[in-house]
Image: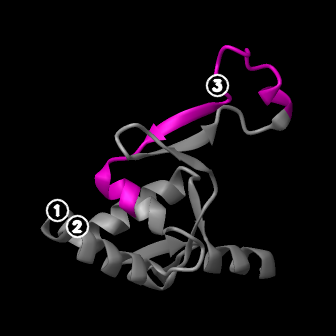
Amino acid sequence: MLMRKNSVNVNLLELTPVAKYSHQVNSDGLIDVLVPRFKGSIMQKFVPKSKSKFIRANLDVIGTEVWRLIDGKRKVSDIAIAIDEKLGEKVQPVYDRLNVFLTQLHNNGFIYFLELNKEKKNG
Protein backbone atom coordinates (compact mmCIF):
# COMPACT_ATOMS: atom_id res chain seq x y z
CA MET A 1 0.00 0.00 0.00
CA LEU A 2 1.78 3.05 -1.25
CA MET A 3 0.65 6.65 -1.37
CA ARG A 4 2.23 9.15 -3.65
CA LYS A 5 3.36 12.39 -2.03
CA ASN A 6 5.28 14.83 -4.25
CA SER A 7 6.58 11.94 -6.42
CA VAL A 8 7.89 10.05 -3.37
CA ASN A 9 6.36 6.69 -2.52
CA VAL A 10 5.21 6.45 1.08
CA ASN A 11 4.19 3.21 2.78
CA LEU A 12 0.67 3.91 4.02
CA LEU A 13 0.94 1.22 6.69
CA GLU A 14 3.67 3.21 8.45
CA LEU A 15 1.63 6.43 8.63
CA THR A 16 -0.41 7.73 11.56
CA PRO A 17 -3.79 9.22 10.55
CA VAL A 18 -5.23 12.12 12.54
CA ALA A 19 -8.87 13.23 12.28
CA LYS A 20 -9.39 16.90 11.39
CA TYR A 21 -13.09 16.97 12.29
CA SER A 22 -15.24 15.96 15.23
CA HIS A 23 -18.06 13.47 14.97
CA GLN A 24 -21.36 12.41 16.50
CA VAL A 25 -22.83 8.97 16.87
CA ASN A 26 -26.24 8.78 15.19
CA SER A 27 -29.28 6.76 16.31
CA ASP A 28 -28.03 3.70 14.37
CA GLY A 29 -24.77 3.73 16.35
CA LEU A 30 -22.83 4.84 13.28
CA ILE A 31 -20.61 7.90 13.07
CA ASP A 32 -21.47 11.15 11.32
CA VAL A 33 -18.36 13.23 10.70
CA LEU A 34 -19.14 16.92 11.21
CA VAL A 35 -17.62 18.85 8.33
CA PRO A 36 -17.81 22.66 8.62
CA ARG A 37 -20.14 24.11 5.98
CA PHE A 38 -17.59 26.88 5.36
CA LYS A 39 -13.85 26.82 5.98
CA GLY A 40 -13.52 30.41 7.17
CA SER A 41 -14.95 31.38 10.52
CA ILE A 42 -16.27 34.64 9.05
CA MET A 43 -18.56 32.78 6.65
CA GLN A 44 -19.86 30.61 9.51
CA LYS A 45 -21.58 33.74 10.88
CA PHE A 46 -23.76 33.94 7.77
CA VAL A 47 -25.25 30.48 8.13
CA PRO A 48 -28.93 30.90 9.09
CA LYS A 49 -29.72 29.82 12.64
CA SER A 50 -32.18 27.27 11.27
CA LYS A 51 -29.34 25.50 9.41
CA SER A 52 -26.49 23.55 10.92
CA LYS A 53 -22.99 24.96 10.54
CA PHE A 54 -21.91 21.42 9.68
CA ILE A 55 -22.50 18.97 6.90
CA ARG A 56 -22.85 15.41 8.17
CA ALA A 57 -20.79 12.80 6.36
CA ASN A 58 -22.44 9.50 7.27
CA LEU A 59 -20.10 6.54 7.64
CA ASP A 60 -21.07 2.90 7.22
CA VAL A 61 -20.17 0.13 9.69
CA ILE A 62 -16.61 -0.30 8.41
CA GLY A 63 -16.01 3.45 8.12
CA THR A 64 -17.31 3.92 11.66
CA GLU A 65 -14.91 1.31 13.04
CA VAL A 66 -11.96 2.86 11.19
CA TRP A 67 -12.89 6.40 12.30
CA ARG A 68 -13.06 5.29 15.94
CA LEU A 69 -9.51 3.93 15.65
CA ILE A 70 -8.09 7.12 14.13
CA ASP A 71 -6.68 8.73 17.25
CA GLY A 72 -3.38 10.24 16.12
CA LYS A 73 -1.44 7.46 17.86
CA ARG A 74 -2.23 4.28 15.92
CA LYS A 75 -0.49 3.54 12.66
CA VAL A 76 -2.51 2.33 9.68
CA SER A 77 -1.06 -1.16 10.16
CA ASP A 78 -2.49 -1.24 13.72
CA ILE A 79 -5.88 -0.06 12.46
CA ALA A 80 -5.87 -2.78 9.79
CA ILE A 81 -5.20 -5.48 12.38
CA ALA A 82 -7.88 -4.14 14.73
CA ILE A 83 -10.66 -3.95 12.12
CA ASP A 84 -9.68 -7.34 10.70
CA GLU A 85 -10.03 -8.86 14.18
CA LYS A 86 -13.35 -7.10 14.83
CA LEU A 87 -15.07 -7.39 11.43
CA GLY A 88 -13.32 -10.41 9.90
CA GLU A 89 -14.66 -11.51 6.52
CA LYS A 90 -16.87 -8.41 6.23
CA VAL A 91 -13.80 -6.19 5.67
CA GLN A 92 -11.74 -8.43 3.36
CA PRO A 93 -9.45 -7.59 1.60
CA VAL A 94 -8.67 -5.37 4.59
CA TYR A 95 -5.51 -3.65 3.31
CA ASP A 96 -6.99 -2.75 -0.06
CA ARG A 97 -10.21 -1.44 1.44
CA LEU A 98 -8.39 0.51 4.12
CA ASN A 99 -6.06 2.01 1.52
CA VAL A 100 -8.98 3.25 -0.58
CA PHE A 101 -10.92 4.59 2.42
CA LEU A 102 -8.00 6.42 4.04
CA THR A 103 -6.90 7.84 0.69
CA GLN A 104 -10.42 9.21 0.16
CA LEU A 105 -10.51 10.68 3.66
CA HIS A 106 -7.12 12.29 3.10
CA ASN A 107 -7.94 13.64 -0.36
CA ASN A 108 -11.19 15.14 0.95
CA GLY A 109 -9.45 16.78 3.90
CA PHE A 110 -11.06 14.69 6.67
CA ILE A 111 -7.69 13.43 7.96
CA TYR A 112 -4.01 14.15 7.66
CA PHE A 113 -1.03 11.94 8.29
CA LEU A 114 1.26 12.93 11.13
CA GLU A 115 4.47 11.95 9.33
CA LEU A 116 3.56 13.82 6.13
CA ASN A 117 2.68 16.96 8.09
CA LYS A 118 6.11 16.89 9.78
CA GLU A 119 7.79 16.69 6.37
CA LYS A 120 5.76 19.70 5.19
CA LYS A 121 6.80 21.78 8.22
CA ASN A 122 10.47 20.78 7.90
CA GLY A 123 10.63 21.21 4.14
Q: Position of residue 84 (x, y in %)?
A: 25, 75
Identify the disc placed on residue 45: none
Dot 2 amino acid type: Leu
Circles 2 and 1: CB atoms closer than 8 Å: yes
Dot 3 amino acid type: Ser
Query: Is residue 7 found left or right of 48 in the rendered image?
Result: left
Q: State which tag comes first along the sequence, 3 or 1.
A: 3
Dot 1 amino acid type: Lys
Label 3, secondary structure: give it: loop
- Residue furthest right in the image: 42
Q: Say which residue label 1 marks.
A: 90
Which residue appears at 30% of the width and 52% of the height?
A: 61
Which residue appears at 38% of the width and 46% of the height?
A: 30
Q: Say which residue label 2 marks.
A: 87
Q: Position of residue 119 (x, y in %)?
A: 70, 80
Front residue of 20/25: it is 25
Label 2, secondary structure: give it: helix
Q: In the rendered structure, which segment of residues is drawn in magenta?
A: 42-65
Label 1, secondary structure: give it: helix
Residue 5 versus residue 27 in the image, above or below: below
- Residue furthest left in the image: 89
Front residue of 6/54: it is 54
Residue 2 versus residue 96 in the image, above or below: below
Quarter holding residue 65:
bottom left
Identify the disc placed on residue 52: 3
Does the stretch in magenta take in 16?
Answer: no
